[in-house]
Image (cartoon, helix red, strand yellow):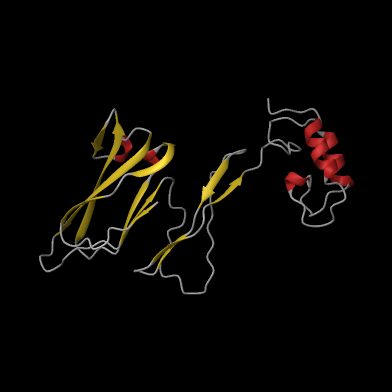
Amino acid sequence: MTIHPVGYVSTGCWESDALDAGQLVDWTNAEIVVSDLPPETAATASFAVYEQGAWVWYSDIHDVPDSESLKVKLTLNTANPAVTPSIESVIVSCGRLLCPLTDVPSGSSVECNWDGLEPNTTYYWQVIVSDGGLLTEGPEWAFTTRGTLLGDLDGDCDVDLADLAQLLGNYGMTSGASYEDGDLDEDGDVDLADLAALLAVYGTTCE
């Protein structure tokens, strides 16, 4: 979620509107990124969640309980009296910034490694790009990690008839096959080698 405090200039406080996630969110994992602050300027954040009919403020995001809504208050201070602080944009990420890259040439490609993923878990990601003025958010994408049990194509922690049926339904694919299609050896097709690999572990479970 991105907040654009249009026209906010000078020291003092700025408070966002309520950010409604539509579901309970662990805000302690959130990150607040303030772009384009002048030198010798600091932005201090405090946070509020809606509890029992009122907004309750916290100075440390790690103290914020799970909530559907969050408010952010920024206090700007500068040690240089000749500087008028301003905020270009504020990014509130409910997860974490994976690859905060700077000075990326226009038209170039970038890569990002995402470590520590859990099996059988759905993750969401989004690309946010800024040129120092205009900030653009890409669509939100999702993917689900594979389970740790070989042959468990549907991710329910066992290798059973459903997994065998899933493989047989795609048997004969010669290219573009995924692991979920039954391509256990990940060579792009679903063939006898994949069927043999699944039958070898048929009946196994995660326990």
Residue sitting at x 15%, y 67%: 83
User: Residue pushed farthest top?
Assistant: 207
Q: Quick check: 123 left or right of 176?
A: left
Residue 123 at least partly seen: yes
Q: Quick check: 198 left or right of 99?
A: right
User: Residue pushed farthest bottom?
Assistant: 106
Please state which of residues 174 and 55 is positioned toward the viewer in this rendering. Answer: 55
| Residue 123 image offset from top left, x and y in percent | 55, 45
Quarter of image, res 53: top left
Residue sitting at x 82%, y 36%: 164
User: Residue pushed farthest right?
Assistant: 192
Residue sitting at x 49%, y 59%: 138
Q: Is residue 192 above or below residue 127?
A: above
| Residue 64 image offset from top left, x and y in percent | 32, 35
Please state which of residues 108 and 140 is positioned toward the viewer in this rendering. Answer: 140
| Residue 13 image offset from top left, x and y in percent | 18, 52
Please state which of residues 151 and 165 is positioned toward the viewer in this rendering. Answer: 165
Q: Quick check: 186 left or right of 48?
A: right
Residue sitting at x 38%, y 33%: 66
Q: Quick check: 131 left or right of 171?
A: left
